[in-house]
Every structure is written in C-alpha cells, then in structure tokens.
Image (cartoon, grey):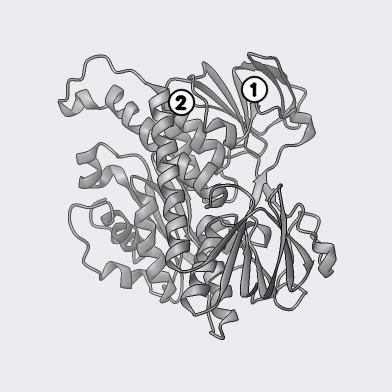
Amino acid sequence: MKYDVVVIGSGPGGYVGAIRAAQLGLKVALIEKYSTLGGTCLNVGCIPSKALLDSSEHYHNAVHQFSQHGIETGKVKVNLNTMIDRKNEVVNQTCKGVEFLMKKNKIDVFTGHGSFIDKNRILIDSGTEKKEIETDKVIIATGSKPVTPAMFNYDKQRVITSTEALNIRTIPSKLVVVGGGVIGLELGSVFARLGTAVEVVEFMDKILPTMDDDCTRELTRSLKKLGIKFHLGHAVTGVNATKKSCIVSVKKKDSDTAFDIDADYCLVAIGRKPYTDGLNLEAIGLATDAKGSIAVNDHLETAVPGVFAIGDIVRGPMLAHKAEEEGVYVAEYIAGGKPHINYNLIPGVVYTWPELSTVGKTEAELKAENIPYKVGKFPFKALGRARASMDTEGLVKVLAHQDTDEILGVHMVGPRVADVIMEAVALMEFRASAEDLTRICHPHPTFTEALKEAALAATDNRAIHI
C-alpha cells in the first residue's frame, strides 16, 4: 500500500503531525511499536505524572490546609493503590482518545517496530509478522528515553526511572532523586506530599539550572518547606541496591566530603536521550550526532530529501508541546504551506506546587547577548486572589528591553502559573511592550493580576499594590 506520509512514533509530535497531514488531505499511516498510542507523554510521562501530582496535592491540602479553611476531616490516609489505579484510568482514557482520533481522521495505524528499507519503503515488524509499506514522505517521531549510566546500576526495581516511579504501590519511607530537573522535582514532590523523606542530589549549584535564578530560589524555598532536602553541588559516585533498599554514594563537588544515603529507591532523573534504536538509519545514509540527535534543516528535513524528524530526536527542548508544533509544521510544509514556529516563545513549565513557568530570555541570556533590559517583579503574597486561596508563595518577573520596552522574557513561580504564562506568550508573539500589558484590563481578583503588576513594575517602577 502506498501512502503520502508515514509517521514513525505516536507520541504528541507523531500523532498530532499525522492528524494535521490527514486534515490537509494526505493519505497517512502511523507506526507505533507499543500496543497503546500516545508515546512517553501519554503513557509514562506528562499525563500520568500530572494525575499523581493532582492526587497527592489533594491529600497534602486535606492534611495541612483544610482545617485552616474551616473544614474538619478527621484522620486522612492515603490509599496508594486507588491513586495508581485512577492514574492508570486517566492514561487509558487519554490513549483511547488518540485511537478515536486516528479512526476519525482515517489514519491507518500499524502496531510494530518501523525501520527503513530505503527512504520510500518502511518495514513493520510486529514480532509475529513483517510487512512493507511504501510512502512518499516520512516523519520520524520516535521520542526519547531516560539516561541511565552504567554506574547507577539501573535495575528497574530499586534503582528506577520515572517509568517505574509512576507505578510504585507502597509509599517509600525514603527516596533519593538524582537530578534537580523537571522530572525529578515533580516526582519528588508527589512522594514528599505523601510522607516520603525525599533527598535530591544535583550536580549544579541550583535546581533547574537553565531557568531564572529568582524563580528557582523561590521554588527551592517552597520545596524545602514541603520537606525535600537538597544536596546542590554534589555528584553521585555510585549506587548499590539490594532486594529491599539501595545505598547512594554522594560526593560534594570540588571537595573530599562524601557520604552515603540509605533509601528505599533511587530515582535517576538526570535527563533523557533521543531514541532512534532499530530505525536502520544507515540504510538511507543518515547518522545521529554525539548526543544521538538527528540533524535537520530549518524545515525539519533531514539530509535525505523527503525524510523529516521532529520532537525529542532533534535539536531544542524535549517538550511535548514543542513536538506537537513541529508535527503540525512538517505536515503543513509537506502539503505546500508556509508554517512558522518561534522557538524563543516555547514556554517551559514545572508542575510542582507552586508551579514554575517561563518563556523568552532569562537575565543571564540577556546579559550574555549584551541586550539592555529592565526588570519588574511582583510577589504573590501581595495579591488578593493568592491570599484568598492561601497560595502566597512565589513571584512574577517581567524582562523588557530598556529602550523599546518590548517584553523579552517572563518568568513565574506561583499558583496556576502553568496557565497564566500563556498571556505572556500571546503578547510576546505580537511583540507587545510591557506598557501594552499594563493597559490590558485584568479581572479582579485573579492570579493574572500578578503579571500586570510585574509589567507595571518594569514600566517606570509603578506597580500599584507593592
């Protein structure tokens, strides 16, 4: 059978790209090696982690905040099995939703491992049979997998990644998280809320090393209040596991100070790497770089004409929404359109509580590029809506060009900032100024008022409520 486009991988980039191509009238096939669609994000990433984050937040609030709201609950306890079962049902419903979308858009789905015979022929190996399909164009969207160096002795039992952490059914007494990035902090938060003693080991001197310093300091303080202990500027030198526990050996950077941490589990969350195993790229003359990525041009086309790559296997942040935009871009480009992605305006979010979100340039980047800028900040503790909900930790920070007043970056840590950040993204897409933001009437009381106040602070230091 001949297709206009074959997509290998059904994660957010792959399935969204397939849908957009089908909407544009192309005949599309989607190949997925696993029995469910949705890739890492829907199955063992974004969706299940958010389900557990929400469940653990409800429990934590019931134990620590309900009484202050005048709600008497008595003794509250966790049924982790029910929590995991609910998470699995959320995943199941979401994956079935993708299956429905494939049928709705008349996309042929093949279950099996896809690999290149040549650039126009794809082999699909289901394990029990092999078949070959022909195509004019190919979109590689195979995603990424956790980095697990040999020194960590990753065994999927006591030394685990996010995949296994999402299915722990007994609350650990102690958890060591290696890596102070997004995945480690989110899953660390889940277990800390449930009563686990969590210790985070991060090689850099701050959590979330690429994000705004003011925001990461605020988040660090909040997570410490939650009970998380941080070993910043430390390296893990080895992990040894038994059937029931593990010992994580830690050494302070540039020092002889070393110690061991005994824990139930060691969660390795030091990053992810592109997954291109078994694609047989050499058959079409493609190779990956030292990091495992596939090189692409400005249209996300590889060195082989007609073969495109998107998402975690190409340059840029490993984010589901970035992959989605690239999937849409390639589909529209193949169909003859002139699509556009502004990579500077892809927001980043950390779903701890408080949440952290960011878009555009950080202060460090502006300084490195010698761009003159001004800063406006506003703390959530000065916001009526935040006081009403008892979510007063965090701040909003607006960076604007010193001369033109154009908004160059917005960084937030606070309640619901994962949603609030989109106001900044929309305004920056149209190159709005800080003053433009201040002239927009914001509903009161809302969390979005903090963004307006930060913009006012950046505009002649005239915030109203501080």
Q: Is residue 22 left or right of residue 133?
A: left
Any part of residue 202 in sight: yes
Q: Is residue 174 above or below residue 409?
A: above
The answer for how far apart the CA atoms under marks 1 and 2 are is: 18 Å
Residue pictured at 18% horizontal, 29% vertical: 69
Query: x, y (%) of residue 160?
Result: 63, 30
Q: Amino acid at mark 2?
A: Ala
- Dot 1 falls on a residue whose secondary structure is loop
Specify few, some or many for label 1: CA neighbours under 10 Å numbering under 14, 14-19, or 20 or more: many
| Residue that label 2 marks | 192
Residue at 21% x, 66% y is 441
Observer-nearest residue: 241 or 127?
127
For the N terminus, give its image quadrant.
bottom right
Location of residue 383 in the rendering, given as x and y in whole percent from the top left corner? 24, 47
Q: Residue furthest left?
A: 70
Dot 2 crowding, Cα within 10 Å, few <14, some 14–19, many 20+: many
Residue type at mark 1: give it: Arg
| Residue name at image x 35 percent, y 63 percent | 423
Q: Position of residue 358 (x, y in %)?
A: 47, 55
The residue beneath circle 1 is 158
* Any part of residue 300 in sight: no
Quarter of the rendering containing residue 335 = bottom right
